[in-house]
């Protein structure tokens, strides 16, 4: 099969990235509301985000979260929803990839403080996939701003596909549409190893086991395990957050020849307090590629994302964050964009 290198429907760098970054800096530099002393302002970040690309979700995908644990005897529950628009059409000498869809990921997590420094919990992940309902808007948006759409104009709008083949008779992935499909169950434990006297700086370790569900892309995936370190550092009105870890990748046997056996991931986030109940957050997230041996940047290179948004709390029991993710640079396996929203409650 002839090589047909193509690019995604948006360029490697967009003026909107600079505008968004400028707006974020202005918000952070604007100062925070008077009232609470800096040491009294709690951390409200980081932003909740998880990669939505079908290529990465063949196995474990990390989700960013805070380093601290819930208090002993307390319960916490949260729901995060991420809506992504995805278009990818690429080919090599040996494979043809076509992704054209919209996806809504819904993750419901519960936690319990087993001791003062240990929390345990679980999570259920659901997914809904369908046609790219925002295709017309995105095409018009890109054309209006002069970004261009590369080969996107060659394909009809509002279609659906999740397919990876060898260009002939062998199909690696051909995933049907789902409505609230059961993607996975995750069981975890997080241990707080260190905390400063003022409780603004924390370091913890987190272990996760992922059990794939009926809608796992490979159909017969196996349990993966992940281990990560989480950290938070508070300095004045700023907080820094970090995550560094790794996981096994044990997909269904038919996908093993094109997948790596392990993955590493990291996140860096910067939070600026805007008062006692609101903060602006900017974070960068990267994960090693899941697929390998394609020799194509948009299939088997590391996905990297810029995520920015706001985090806040309402009273002592409720918290939330709202975020926007953009793939930077654009020619990686990351999704085009994700709109995310998390709401949490503690008892």
Image: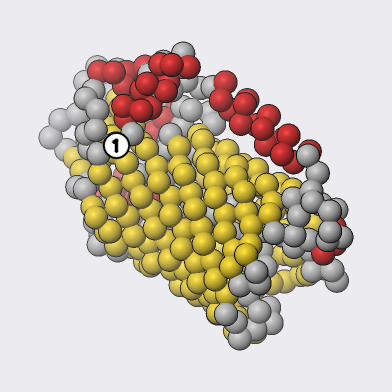
Quadrant the N terminus occupies: top left
The quarter of the displayed image where residue 222 is located: bottom left
Position in image of residue 309 (x %, y %): 60, 45
Q: Can residue 34 be seen in this snapshot?
A: yes
The percent coordinates of residue 135 (x first, y second) are 32, 30
Q: Is residue 151 above or below residue 220?
A: above
Q: Residue furthest top?
A: 146
- Mark 1 is surrounded, within 10 Å at the Cα level, by few (under 14), some (14 to 19) or many (20 or more) other residues, namely some
On the question of residue 223 being in view, the answer is: no
In the drawing, does residue 133 fall left or right of residue 144? left
Q: Is residue 294 left or right of residue 168?
A: right
**What residue is disc 1 on?**
133
Q: Residue furthest front?
A: 34
Residue extending furthest left? 169
Residue at position x 61%, y 86% in the image: 73
Q: Is residue 280 above or below residue 13?
A: below
Query: How far across and how far down the image is residue 264, in percent?
Result: 54, 50
Residue 142, x across and y down, in percent: 42, 20
Left-right relation of 127 to 79: left
The answer to whether 28 is drawn above or below residue 33 in the figure is above
Asked whether, in this view, residue 119 is left or right of residue 40, the answer is: left
Quarter of the image with the C terminus is bottom right
- Which residue sits at x=78%, y=39%? 30
Residue at disc 1, secondary structure: loop
Q: How is the image coloured?
A: secondary structure
Comparing 314 with 192, the one in front is 314
Measuring 38% from the left and 27% from the top, which residue is drawn there? 138
């Amino acid at each position: 099969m002839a090589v047909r290198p193509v690019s995604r429907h948006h360029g490697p760098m967009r003026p909107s990235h600079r505008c968004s970054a400028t707006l974020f800096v202005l918000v952070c530099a604007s100062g925070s509301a008077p009232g609470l002393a800096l040491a009294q302002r709690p951390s409200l970040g980081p932003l909740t985000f998880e990669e939505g690309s079908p290529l990465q979700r063949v196995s474990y995908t990390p989700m960013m979260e805070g380093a601290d644990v819930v208090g002993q005897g307390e319960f916490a529950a949260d729901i995060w929803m991420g809506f992504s628009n995805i278009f990818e059409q690429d080919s090599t000498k040996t494979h043809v990839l076509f992704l054209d869809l919209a996806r809504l990921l819904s993750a419901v997590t519960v936690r319990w403080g087993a001791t003062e420094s240990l929390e345990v919990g679980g999570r259920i992940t659901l997914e809904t996939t369908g046609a790219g309902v925002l295709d017309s808007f995105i095409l018009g948006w890109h054309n209006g701003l002069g970004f261009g759409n590369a080969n996107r104009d060659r394909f009809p709008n509002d279609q659906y596909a999740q397919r990876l083949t060898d260009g002939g008779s062998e199909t690696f992935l051909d995933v049907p549409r789902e409505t609230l499909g059961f993607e996975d169950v995750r069981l975890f434990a997080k241990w707080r190893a260190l905390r400063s006297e003022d409780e603004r700086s924390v370091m913890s370790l987190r272990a996760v086991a992922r059990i794939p569900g009926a809608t796992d892309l490979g159909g017969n995936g196996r349990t993966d395990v992940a281990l990560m370190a989480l950290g938070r550092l508070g300095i004045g009105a700023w907080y820094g957050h970090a995550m560094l870890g790794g996981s096994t990748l044990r997909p269904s046997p038919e996908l093993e020849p094109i997948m790596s056996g392990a993955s590493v991931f990291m996140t860096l986030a910067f939070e600026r307090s805007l008062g006692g109940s609101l903060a602006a957050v900017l974070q960068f997230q990267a994960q090693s590629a899941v697929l390998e041996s394609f020799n194509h940047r948009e299939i088997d290179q590391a996905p990297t994302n810029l995520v920015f948004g706001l985090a806040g709390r309402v009273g002592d029991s409720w918290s939330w964050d709202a975020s926007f993710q953009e793939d930077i640079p654009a020619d990686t396996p990351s999704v085009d964009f994700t709109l995310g929203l998390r709401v949490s409650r503690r008892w």
